[in-house]
Image: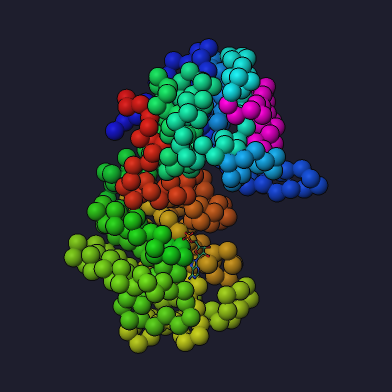
Amino acid sequence: MAKLSVRDLDVRGRRVLVRVDFNVPVEEVDGRIRITDDTRIQESLPSIRLLQEKGAKVILLAHFGRPKGQPNPKYSLRPVAEHLRTLLGGSVEFSPEVIGEKAEAASRDVPDGGVLLIENVRFYKEEEKNDENFARALARLGDVYVNDAFGAAHRAHASTAGVAKFMPQAAMGLLMERELKYLQEELANPKRPFLVILGGSKVSDKIGVIHSLMEKADSFLIGGAMAYTFYRALGIPTGASRVEEDKVDLARELLDRAKTKGIKFLLPVDNIEAAEFRAGAPTRNTPRVSASQGISEGWMGVDIGRETIAQYKAEIANAKTILWNGPVGVFEIPDFAQGTRAVAEAVAAADATTIIGGGDSVTAVKQFGLADRMTFISTGGGASLELLEGKELPGVAALTDK
Ligand code: AMP
């Protein structure tokens, strides 16, 4: 169902309450909070700037960390307001009150085109409980509502979902719109072949995604530790690799299902195995796997092998839509990163719509300097996975239908 967009709103002179994702990583240096990665703040700038240009009074709502429902200076959004001021190059006010008379007065004092950031909504336990009275109090800070916090859209909280009910109009922001365009619309009618690359540490995190995408994708490439749970299901030796014992039956079911549906479901045909899980540990490329030969006793699989890389590259080059979620090896350790790098380079070079579906594969793509060669990189973690699982996100469901 198409939702109202911030682009559709008439906002001149009106207070637009915008839920953004400012939950950025920080470090404390000499008692001062420093933002170590401001990607999330940057990603919300297009919506903020659009609203400023249209003459709106922009009131920003966000959460930061886990203050457990109580005011806590450690989790104040004040440093974010300062950072935002440098990014927008203009006046950005900060309200230390989240709700109530003072906060409402501050929202009314914002000039047209001005910005006010409200203190961390999670200073109230009512936020995560999606409390109606709290949502109503938040709604008094604005005249219309915009949700641009894709990364928090899978949570039914007061500022992400509840508040929408008390607003005459609730629209998606530009970032939210882009996320839905690529993770939902584009994948509903993909150009074929549609290839899904899945890696990461656990099958259990991706079961829902595999189930849902088996209805749409033509082929799957599996890597990362999750491959070894599938190995176990096939009786291939896994050595000391990470295997989810309680998911082996499920892995077998997924393999059967792929077979029945005629979907290509490729597991690594060889691997890099390491004697220890650390940089500099001895490694070797295993021979081609079979029922009797897989990962060696006492060794662990840490990356896909050379033959697998060649095979996966060919599949990637042939695809017209590619969705990638999860590294195919322990890419944080450079010795074990070759498979993930090769996959990232092949995806970047593919003549296809390429979508990086959130989490650690995003980190990997950025680390390899390939981010601007992908069609779309999702900013969500849990929200991206839930969307790919075909679930409705509460933060989207709450918005006004177009
Ligand atoms: P996820 O958060 O599920 O996408 O998993 C990402 C994590 O999986 C990364 O930190 C990788 O280091 C880890 N990973 C990938 N391959 C392996 C492997 N073969 N063994 C252990 N961990 C792995």
Residue at position x 62%, y 32% in the image: 119
Q: Is residue 81 magenta?
A: yes
- Expressed as whole percent of the image width and height from the top left, the position of residue 215 reads 24, 53
Q: From which residue to which does the magenta span run?
A: 76-99
Instruction: Give the position of the N terminus as an image quadrant.
Output: top left
- Front position in the image: 182 or 284: 182
At which x and y percent is residue 268? 38, 72
**Residue 340 visible to an observer of this rendering:** yes
Q: Is residue 224 above or below residue 112?
A: below
Which residue: 57% across, 75% down?
277
The residue at the point 23 percent across, 69 percent down is: 256
**Rendered location of residue 4, percent (x, y):** 37, 26
Answer left or right for 162 relative to 259. right
Instruction: Say if 167 sits above or below 211 in the image.
Output: above
What is the residue that sits farthest to the left in this orientation? Answer: 260
The quarter holding residue 265 reads bottom left
